[in-house]
Image (tube, grey):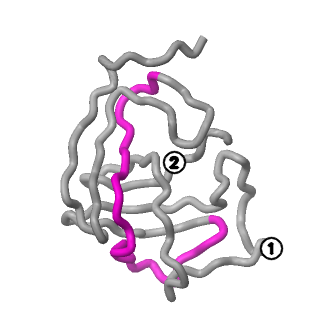
Amino acid sequence: MTAQIHERLIFNGEQTSMTLCPPLPDQHPRIIKLDEDDVEGRFSTACRRKYIGTWEIKDNQFYLIDITGRYKMSDKNPIFADWFSGVIRIPKGDLLEYVHIGFGSVYEQEIHVKIENGKVIKSNIIDNRTKTRRDTR
């Protein structure tokens, strides 16, 4: 599998990305799946999900605010992501190790944000600069 395009994220008011694709809710009335003929743009193996979501963490809550590709939102109002529980990884700094699969690449730092039912539970910063990495030569 090819390294994947990151989902977009607005975190602390700053546009960044995250190395995780939170699932979309099944049959949400405001998320519309498009016919293949209606999908704008072409998606490569670097985006197997065939969409890119834009998410936001605001007031300790996680929202889907836009989506492009095989899905679209019926309006511009954010959708509270109460269906999502998990840890999102936000890369920071330079790329230290490129991994040609999924979201395995390593950056100088990562912010890990734990979310339960759309609410931020905790976050912490992981510093990868001092960790031993495998030799990729």
For residue 78, which quarter of the picture?
Answer: bottom left
- For the residues marked 1 and 2, what is the alpha-carbon distance in whole angstroms? 24 Å
Residue 7 is situated, as x and y percent measured from the top left of the image, at: 49, 53
Residue name at image x 33 percent, y 37 percent: 110
Compared with 119, 94 (above or below) is above
What residue is drawn where x is 40% and y is 62%?
55
Q: Residue at x 64, y 65 (%)?
A: 69
Q: Residue furthest right?
A: 37
Task: Name the residue that disc number 1 marks.
Answer: 37
Q: What secondary structure is marked by label 2?
A: loop
Q: Which residues are magenta?
A: 69-96
Q: Are marks 1 and 2 in contact (CB under 8 Å)?
A: no
| Quarter of the image where one finds residue 114 | bottom left
| Mark 1: secondary structure | helix
Q: Position of residue 41 (x, y in %)?
A: 72, 60
First reached walking from the N terminus: tag 1 or tag 2? 2
